[in-house]
Image (cartoon, grey):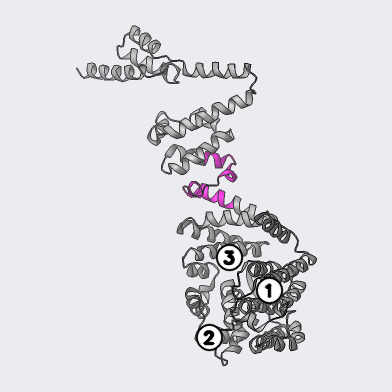
């Protein structure tokens, strides 16, 4: 009795399949016919159902393709038309559960492997994998593609983040591409890497851990720069990743440095007690590694606190702020195989940097008018040969020119602050990008308090500064910006 019921059930399932459109074209048609006969099915019914439901859709498509070729259409174009239409149909009717059922038969279907060899089908798989992240078949195919060396094609972050093996290969490929990229491609490549790393908390921690491990090789400075870009992006999205950063770079091994540094970086504000604490630690004979206080965010906080005209820094604490900044920017360490062997603390270099910072700070803070600044210009130029002083003065110029009262005090056709930028550009190649970005901000600012003609004259002066940058070998970004402005006019 049970056998009869089983036979009827199998026959019913087979008849249902035979009744589907063009089932005779399916790869499993012979296995289904065998099952049907094995359970007592009638041959006549098989022939009748298969023939009645044969619509020849595939053959009709082939016939249409042949006709198109006969009318003069290129065969390659016909193939592309068919492939694109098939992709549209698959994307429209794709069902993850049915797709996962292909593994029930055991083994990987040969047609799936064939699909991975063609760019069009790979693109469709990437798109479907992003839309159906939980589909086993698609995740398996993505891993298959990565194992075949196609990880550089995966541009979708959610797709890459689905599996740790896939994410690792995509991450390493993107890191390598970023390291090897030319300056013109750096921005695009680093943006791709940042988006990949900041997809989630897990991807951020994993990416930063990988970069921290890689930072021991010869390209450690590039790796650190990449890690800093990722950290900046995470902070811009409102995430506090300070503790992760300090843990990965080894700051936690120095509790007396970690505590004040973590507090200030988390709050994005300095406080005299913590700065004094760090200053004393780094003035001691057994000072911790200088790299711990060379974090861009911390350096930026020190520069802002010292050179913002509106800063309320107590004069008693100023030497400690300057001393800490000078130490971070002038002390060198020698390392062998990632082990800190010795510290070369050039007292003369540190002393000169400290004196230059103090002198520049005094000039910038005390200069209330253009006349005052011009009288101290020669002294300021001497200080500008130190890169950190140039960076500080550049920041001070930004504060001064964007001050609403600036143009009330400076009526010259060429503000002296812009002339100082010329000197900075001539002295320091590595500050070219920052100087250019500042000039662009000046050029695009509205300055509502200025008369139209005066504003136009000011813009002309900014362009003169950019021409000077051209003479200092900063060419491509300037020309690119000029072209962009010309097209937008």
The answer to if 152 sits in the magenta stretch is yes
Q: Is residue 319 above or below residue 198?
A: below
Going by the image, does 139 lie left or right of 370?
A: left
Q: Residue 310, image x and y in percent?
A: 56, 84
Residue extending furthest toward the right = 471
Quarter placement of the C terminus: bottom right
- Residue at which label 1 appears: 454
The Cα atoms of the two marked residues, 2 and 3, are separated by 25 Å
Instruction: Tell me the mark number nearer the camera, choosing from 2 and 1.
Output: 1
**Which region is colored magenta?**
143-172
Q: Residues within 10 Å of mark 1 (few under 14, many from 20)?
A: few
Residue 104 falls in image quadrant: top left
Going from N to C along the chain, the mark reached first, 2 or 3, is 3
Q: Residue 282, image x and y in percent?
A: 59, 83
Q: Are marks 1 and 3 in contact (CB under 8 Å)?
A: no
Q: Residues within 10 Å of mark 3 (few under 14, many from 20)?
A: some
Q: Are marks 2 and 1 in contact (CB under 8 Å)?
A: no
- Secondary structure, mark 1, is helix
- Residue at which label 2 appears: 277
Instruction: Tell me the mark number nearer the camera, choosing from 2 and 3.
Output: 3
Q: Is residue 16 above or below residue 114?
A: above
Q: Residue 453, image x and y in percent?
A: 68, 71
Q: Residue 262, image x and y in percent?
A: 49, 75
Residue extending furthest toward the top = 44
Task: Name the magenta segment's main secondary structure.
Answer: helix
Of residues 353 and 340, the one drawn nearer to the viewer in this rendering: 353
Going from N to C along the chain, the mark reached first, 1 or 3, is 3
The answer to if 89 sits in the magenta stretch is no
């Amino acid at each position: 009795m049970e056998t009869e019921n089983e036979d009827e059930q199998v026959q019913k399932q087979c008849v249902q399949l035979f009744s589907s459109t063009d089932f005779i074209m399916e790869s499993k048609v012979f296995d289904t016919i065998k099952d049907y006969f094995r359970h007592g099915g009638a041959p006549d019914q098989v022939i009748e159902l298969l023939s009645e439901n044969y619509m020849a859709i595939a053959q009709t498509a082939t016939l249409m393709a042949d006709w198109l070729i006969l009318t003069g259409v290129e065969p390659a174009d016909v193939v592309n038309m068919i492939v694109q239409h098939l992709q549209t149909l698959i994307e429209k009717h794709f069902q993850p559960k049915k797709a996962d059922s292909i593994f029930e038969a055991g083994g990987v279907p040969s047609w799936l492997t064939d699909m991975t060899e063609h760019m069009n089908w790979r693109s469709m798989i990437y798109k479907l994998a992003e839309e159906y992240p939980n589909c086993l078949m698609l995740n398996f195919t993505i891993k298959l593609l990565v194992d075949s060396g196609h990880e550089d094609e995966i541009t979708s972050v959610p797709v890459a983040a689905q599996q740790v093996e896939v994410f690792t290969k995509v991450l390493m490929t993107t890191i390598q591409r970023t390291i090897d990229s030319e300056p013109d491609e750096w921005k695009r490549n680093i943006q791709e890497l940042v988006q990949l790393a900041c997809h989630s908390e897990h991807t951020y921690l994993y990416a930063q851990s990988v970069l921290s491990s890689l930072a021991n090789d010869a390209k450690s400075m590039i790796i650190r720069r990449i890690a800093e870009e990722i950290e900046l992006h995470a902070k811009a999205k409102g995430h506090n990743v300070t503790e992760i950063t300090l843990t990965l770079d080894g700051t936690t091994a120095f509790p007396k440095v970690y505590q004040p540094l973590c507090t200030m970086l988390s709050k994005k504000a300095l406080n005299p007690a913590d700065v004094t604490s760090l200053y004393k630690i780094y003035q001691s004979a057994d000072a911790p590694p200088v790299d711990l206080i060379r974090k861009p965010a911390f350096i930026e906080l020190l520069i802002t606190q010292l050179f913002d005209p509106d800063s309320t820094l107590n004069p008693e604490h100023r030497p400690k702020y300057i001393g800490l900044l000078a130490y971070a920017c002038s002390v060198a360490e020698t390392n062998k195989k990632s082990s800190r062997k010795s510290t070369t603390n050039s007292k003369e270099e540190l002393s000169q940097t400290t004196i230059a910072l103090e002198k520049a700070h005094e000039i910038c803070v005390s200069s209330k008018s253009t006349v005052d600044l011009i009288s101290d210009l020669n002294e300021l130029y001497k200080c500008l040969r130190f890169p950190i002083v140039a960076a500080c003065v550049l920041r001070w110029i930004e504060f001064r020119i964007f001050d609403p009262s600036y143009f009330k005090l400076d009526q010259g056709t060429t503000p002296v602050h812009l002339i100082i930028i010329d000197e900075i550009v001539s002295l320091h190649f590595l500050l070219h990008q920052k100087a250019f970005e500042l000039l662009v901000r000046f050029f695009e600012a509205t300055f509502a308090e200025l008369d139209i003609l005066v504003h136009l004259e000011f813009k002309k002066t900014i362009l003169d500064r950019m021409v000077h940058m051209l003479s200092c070998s900063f060419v491509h970004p300037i020309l690119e910006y000029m072209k962009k402005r010309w097209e937008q006019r």
